[in-house]
Image (spheres, grey):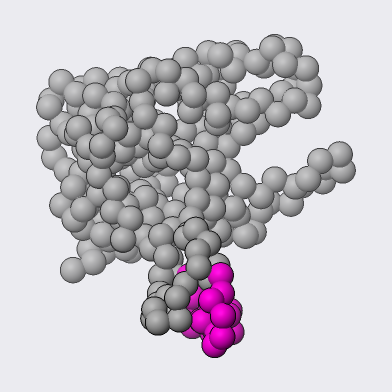
């Protein structure tokens, strides 16, 4: 199987061919079409099923195939937005109910054999405006980290973040953690239990970086390409850096305008994109050229 290619077609048809060909990937980063949100005008597109249950069953079928493609220590990074019910014919809920689709799918995947390792909140700094007056404006989506087995590849050091407590911009806060003269004092350090410290012990050393937290504040990034919901590059970078190494294979079965492919190419990962809409083939080629290999 040739790496670094876009395969045009329905992922439900393409994925079995990849499995049969012996393809194995280290990680899958993807965002399926959201339920009932957009009609892309393509026959057989996912997201326009008659019921929420049909939609979830379809995605379970897709991710069973992804499970077969992953190496033993592989991971799935799944982004999915929620939808509101428009009536009893869409999920069996009265109108205006938040359907809870991301969590319904995550728990269904867990029941299907996946390890549900974490729910990450993607907090959008620039959310789309909403005219609703009976609830808050939505500013987040979920990103689920799932693994094939209990032990899996995860490079936490590659995605460490500046510490808001110990960073250079927080020198005053950092100073508040040093020991004062006199009696033993309780030193409160985030991530550590409170304890009594002797005066003859050195002060706790500050660090400029910390392990990444589970709320990722990332702005949406409009592009010149005709796609309504492109992945932000920064979001994909974090998933790739944590879930793979240079030279690994990466899969996106709902590739859209090809952000995963472009960032994978930039970070020296091999990639396979599957996209139902043939119009995006040229977009993939253009974006991977715009974001060349990071050599």
| Nearest the eye: 277 or 222 | 222
Q: Is residue 271 above or below residue 274?
A: below
* Residue 270 drawn at (x, y percent): 20, 48
Q: Is residue 181 above or below residue 192?
A: below
| Residue 164 drawn in magenta | yes
Asked whether the viewer can see residue 56, the reply is yes
Residue closest to the far right: 133
* Residue beneath the point at 78% across and 27% down: 96
* Residue 91 drawn at (x, y percent): 65, 15
* Residue beneath the point at 26% across and 64% down: 292
* Residue beneath the point at 86% across and 39% down: 134
| Nearest the eye: 192 or 186 | 186
* Residue beneath the point at 81% across and 41% down: 135
| Residue 278 drawn in magenta | no
Q: Is residue 43 above or below residue 288?
A: above
Q: Which is the main secondary structure of the residues drawn in magenta?
A: loop
Relative to residue 221, is residue 140 drawn left or right?
A: right
* Residue 137 drawn at (x, y percent): 75, 47
Quarter of the image holding residue 199?
bottom left
Instruction: Name the quadrant of the N terminus.
Output: top left
Instruction: Name the quadrant of the C terminus.
Output: bottom left
* Residue 88 drawn at (x, y percent): 73, 12
Q: Which portion, as a residue range, is magenta?
A: 163-186
Q: Is residue 61 above or below residue 168?
A: above
Quarter of the image holding residue 17?
top left
């Amino acid at each position: 199987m040739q790496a670094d290619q876009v395969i045009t077609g329905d992922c439900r048809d393409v994925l079995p061919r990849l499995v049969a060909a012996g393809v194995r990937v280290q990680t899958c980063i993807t965002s399926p079409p959201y339920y009932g949100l957009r009609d892309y005008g393509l026959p057989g597109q996912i997201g326009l099923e008659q019921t929420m249950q049909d939609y979830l069953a379809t995605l379970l079928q897709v991710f069973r195939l992804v499970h077969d493609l992953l190496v033993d220590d592989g991971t799935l990074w799944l982004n999915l937005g929620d939808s509101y019910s428009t009536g009893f014919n869409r999920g069996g809920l009265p109108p205006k109910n938040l359907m809870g689709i991301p969590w319904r799918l995550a728990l269904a995947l867990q029941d299907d054999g996946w390890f549900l390792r974490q729910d990450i909140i993607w907090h959008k700094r620039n959310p789309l405006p909403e005219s609703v007056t009976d609830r808050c404006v939505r500013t987040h989506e979920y990103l689920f980290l799932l693994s094939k087995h209990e032990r899996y590849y995860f490079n936490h050091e590659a995605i460490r973040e500046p510490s808001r407590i110990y960073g250079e911009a927080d020198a005053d806060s950092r100073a508040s953690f040093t020991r004062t003269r006199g009696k033993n004092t309780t030193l409160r350090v985030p991530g550590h239990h409170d304890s009594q410290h002797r005066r003859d012990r050195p002060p706790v050393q500050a660090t400029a970086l910390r392990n990444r937290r589970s709320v990722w504040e990332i702005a949406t990034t409009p592009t010149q390409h005709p796609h309504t919901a492109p992945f932000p590059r920064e979001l994909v970078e974090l998933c790739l850096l944590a879930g793979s190494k240079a030279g690994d294979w990466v899969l996106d079965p709902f590739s859209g305008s090809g952000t995963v492919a472009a960032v994978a190419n930039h970070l020296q990962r091999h990639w396979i994109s599957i996209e139902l809409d043939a119009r995006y083939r040229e977009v993939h080629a253009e974006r991977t050229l715009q974001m060349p290999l990071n050599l």
